[in-house]
Image (cartoon, helix red, strand yellow):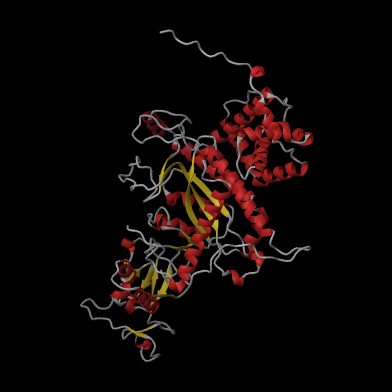
Amino acid sequence: MTRPRPARRIPHSELPAAWIHTLRERRKPVTRAEATRARQFVDRSGVLPLITHALDAHRKSPAGRPRTVTIQALFVGMTLASWRAQGRVVLADVADLLAQQLPASIRTQLALPAWPDDVDGFEAAYLAVRRAFHAVERVMDPSPLPKRRIKRTDAAALEAGADQSDLDRRRALLVEVTNRILEASLAPARPLIDEYWEGAVAVDATPVRTFSAGVHPGTEHTATDPDAAWYVRDGNHRDPSDTTDGRKAKKSRRSLFGYETTLAVLGDTTPASDLPPELRLPALALAFTVHKPGHDPAGNALTALKDMARRRYRPGRLAADRAYSSSQPVTFHIPVHDLGYQPIWDYRRDQLGIQGTHAGALLVDGTWYCPHIPKPLITATADYLAQKIDRTTWRHRVDARPAYRLRPKAAPDARGARRLLCPAAGTHPTAACPVKPRSLGRDPRLIPVDPAPTPGGHPEVCVRESLTFHRDTGIRFWQELEHARPDWVRLYFHLRNRVEHFNQYAKDHEALERSRTRRVRGIAAQSILLAFQLAHANHRKLAAWLDTLQSATQPARRRPTNRRTPNNPHDWTPKRHSHNP
């Protein structure tokens, strides 16, 4: 059989020119003011010194010609492209924008050459932009894998032989650079955030597709984006092929190939009716990280919170779902406490009831109670989920718990230790107990406590007026608000709704989840492109919010909303919201 001849390479002059005409028709020249704003945005972010230093350290020698497209020009072009395409950054659009749409004076300031307006000129500009982009993402790539299809055995060998300290340094640089881009979008609201915001934050992870088709876990080769993995909707979102810790993902109802983005979203704890319109800040993305689906959710959330601390955001309430509250204390709860956050947790079914003890005190559903709290109150939520009691009985039992709660005597000390009072101790007891004679006969409304005698005597918490609870005591489950009580319901679901709202907002407008909006492979490239999409979402949020405020020419007006009337927190039940462990 005759072997077919190889196809002849067609010169550019013979190629169809229809696409170049289409490119010209959709151009919109950049105004000088628009270019200046983009330069100010890049300068405000402070990413150029960081990237320039990393590139200089990565170079083997000072030899070589200067870059055709400087790092400043690249980021100005990506900023302009994201503003014009709903946050999407496509390198071909960046190349055409830098080559043909900038004013001559701006091109001179950015040290850009003159490219002809033809196929050869476009390809030259595109290659220069592509080289600059890959040089940037390469110095902050936390993965040792090439961005192409390779054998899984080769990928495992590359990961095993990589310098972990160098990868950690690159990841730290990637997190800082991408969050600096996000921070630059918050500049209009940062003074108000610093002055009036109480520090409330909600963290959550959302999946994003990558521009690479996933492959079956049993195949010999990886996908063309080996940094990505399968996201599964149920369970812990892990790739079904990942069994590095002996656990497998649960059966999936929905899956996609890509990454997860952990977001920290600005929340508020003050009712909207108590704030003037100019202080009702919208839900904004304050920090984010990109990672494989289901890989170390607590560690990635902590990375985002630490970057917020680097940028001097004050800590406050922190709401997170069960994927974070079920983590190990040393990897999440203790560092979160050390950062100054006050957690608001929810629990799985198998975590309800008694979660710990200390000197006789019982940790029940995240709160320390008297050891003589009636058992029906301890198991109230677990019994309701097991359909042993009805809704009214469950609510009465949960509302009866505060009388047995250990009350704070003073604020925590510098080491995080807290002193808590027995409910029958102090000048304002909430229970009457014969072990504390001063609590008897004070108020007939006090709940009577009848401790049963034991051979070893009464627990230490009963004998003493107050007791010290060190930082790590019960830290995995403890929270300041009582679980399922109205204050907890209002704050937990309000903060969780804020982060879920922002996730959907960015997916609807910036197409955050769609792979076509980020066409470069690799976790570093995906992180940089996602940073511009999230920054654009913040821009739109702030523009809509500023448009409603009072000015010299228009009165303040309410933002249109399709929200329903808020549910009464007293009517909430855990039944609809629970999962099996």
Q: Nearer the viewer, residue 94 or 332?
A: 94
- Report x, y in % for residue 123: 64, 25
- The structure residue drawn at horizontal position 57% and vertical position 26%, both measured from the top left corner, is 60
- Report x, y in % for residue 532: 60, 44
Where the N terminus falls, by quadrant?
Answer: top left
> Residue 360 lies in what quarter of the image?
bottom left
Where the C terminus falls, by quadrant?
Answer: bottom left
Q: Nearer the viewer, residue 389 or 295?
A: 389
In the rendered image, is residue 144 in sight? yes
Horizontally, residue 87 falls left or right of residue 449, namely: right
- The structure residue drawn at horizontal position 31% and vertical position 70%, both measured from the top left corner, is 379
* Residue 279 higher or lower than 64, as above or below: below
- The structure residue drawn at horizontal position 64% and vertical position 44%, both measured from the top left corner, is 46
> Residue 160 lies in what quarter of the image?
top left
- Report x, y in % for residue 73: 68, 35
- Report x, y in % for residue 282: 60, 59
* Residue 459 higher or lower than 526, as above or below: below
- The structure residue drawn at horizontal position 38% and vertical position 66%, both measured from the top left corner, is 574
Q: How many marks?
A: 0
Q: Nearer the viewer, residue 298 or 569?
A: 569
Horizontally, residue 59 falls left or right of residue 258, namely: right
